[in-house]
Amino acid sequence: MKWLRSQAIRSRITIWSVVIAIVLIAIAGLGFRISVDSIVSGSTRDLLASDGAPYEASIVRGDTKTFARPAEDQLIALIDPTGAVRISDLPSSLADKIESLADFGHGVHIVTTRSKSQYDVQNETVHTKAGDWHVIEARNRAEGDVVLSGLTTVTIVGGVALVVAFGIASWIVTGLALRPVTRLRRQASLLAQNARAGILPIGPVHDEISALAITLNEFITSERASADRERQMVADASHELRTPIAVLTTQLQLAHLSTGDAEALEGEIAAAEQTLTRLANLTTNLLTLSRIEAEEEVPVTSADALLAEFFSSMDRAIVLGSAHSVAVDFTTDGVDAKTAVTIPPVDFAGLVDNLVSNAIAASPRGSGVDVRLARIGKQLVLTVADRGHGITDDFLPVAFDRFSRPEESRQHTIGGNGLGLAIVKAIVVRSGGGVRLEQRKEGGVRAVVTFPTVS
């Protein structure tokens, strides 16, 4: 079995097919031989009965003075009630045993002579008033044995031919069936050499191999998307980090040049600290975005945990809004104990913080931001609305892209790195929800986030 497991699939299928064919053909051949043997035995019994029938009829009628001689191919012996043999054309090897043959009971018996010849012998006893007559019929088994032997030979030869033909057919059919697998392997080899070499071919028949190709293509597409995200992340990070690093380098060089001027040196150090803060925020957001996109399992957060994170975010928002003279009003509606969402609590808090901080950044001093968390049907809906200058229609399609920034009027108060809305979208998509931005007729922008509830 270990040897068989080491063989190719085509060889294993062919070998098992041949083994099964041998077993089935052997069973069928054995059954056929038994059936033929039974037919031959029945025919012999009928022939023996027909050979002795005329003599039995004569004895029953009482016509026992003379009997017709048996035909050339008949072996008959008649023994009268006195034990005298009235007729016998049995061969001498059977004639010597005639007394024992007369003792046979009903049915066909096989008798082997000294010369190893075998005969089917039947003894029919006919009861008369004068006593019992014995009609002994015999048939040489040699003819039937020749027929059975020839039949056995034909069966074996035919069985071997069928097994060979079955093996060849199995090898060919298996090769045809595995041809799509060969195409898959070749394409996979090309993919190993070139990750952009297309996808695996899908056959026209919706079978197991097509299903495998579809599944593998989904995996390849997912892996390519992941690789694209990683490449984009590296490219974006490189682009975004290049400017602050260059600025920081310049500021440090200026600080070196300002060693004799304490006030100028302090100013350059403060500027460098701001640049480092921007770099730290950018790095933190990149790591957060990478973590969200890499998560495979998302926990379910209960209503109590959601409300706790929401209220904490509102506390932070009120403090941030006060620092910029922006009022933050919030309400909750219908968020009961049955409300649960597939989202990590820390990500929910980060999502609320990002949207509210963006709204505060877009709001002029003296205005306000409205935040509402409500359960509507089977969805949890978060709405954040500001009263700022709004955004252009051109920015809406790319608002959730990484490092996308609106015009200066939307960020006049607080600067950003263009990752806040990208993080929001990644959190929402990972949780199976949706997010959109809407222009308000009265001015400003409304962010609407929906989460499907799990209870």
Image (tube, rainbow, N blue to C red):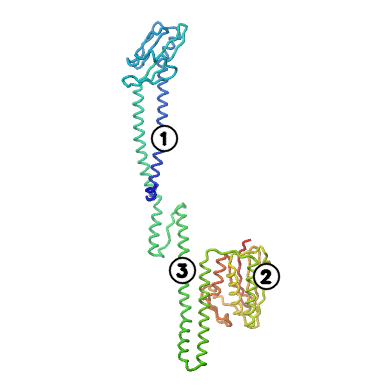
Q: Is residue 447 above or below residue 155?
A: below
Secondary structure of the residue carrying tag 3 is helix
**Amino acid at circle 1:** Ala
Quarter assignment of residue 389: bottom right
Q: Horizontal placement of 17 versus 423: left or right?
A: left
Secondary structure state at the residue bearing disc 1: helix
Amino acid, disc 3? Asp
Point out the tag, 2 or 3, that comes first from the N-terminus: 3
Location of residue 151 in the rendering, given as x and y in whole percent from the top left corner: 36, 30
- CA distance separating discs 2 and 3: 39 Å
Q: How many marks?
A: 3
The percent coordinates of residue 210 (x first, y second) are 45, 54
Query: Label 1: which residue?
Result: 28
Position of residue 243 in the picture relative to residue 73 (left or right) = right
* Residue depicted at 34% across the width and 17% down the height: 73
Label whose residue precedes the other's in the sequence (1 or 3): 1
Q: Is residue 167 left or right of residue 407?
A: left
432 up-or-down from 77: above or below: below
Percent position of residue 51, x then y = 40, 16
Residue to which mark 3 is pinned: 228
Looking at this rendering, what residue extends furthest in the bottom direction?
A: 260
Residue visible at 44% across and 17% down in the picture: 105
Secondary structure of residue under mark 2: strand
Please say if the residues under marks 1 and 2 sit with CB atoms less than 8 Å apart. Answer: no
In space, the residues marked 1 and 3 are separated at their CA atoms by: 62 Å
Q: Which residue is mark 2?
A: 332
Vertical side of 92 occupied by 163: above or below? below
Q: In the image, residue 8 lies at what x, y percent?
A: 37, 51
Quarter of the figure with the C terminus: bottom right
**Spatial CA span between label 1 and label 2:** 79 Å
Circle 2/circle 3 CB separation < 8 Å:
no
Q: Amino acid at mark 2?
A: Thr
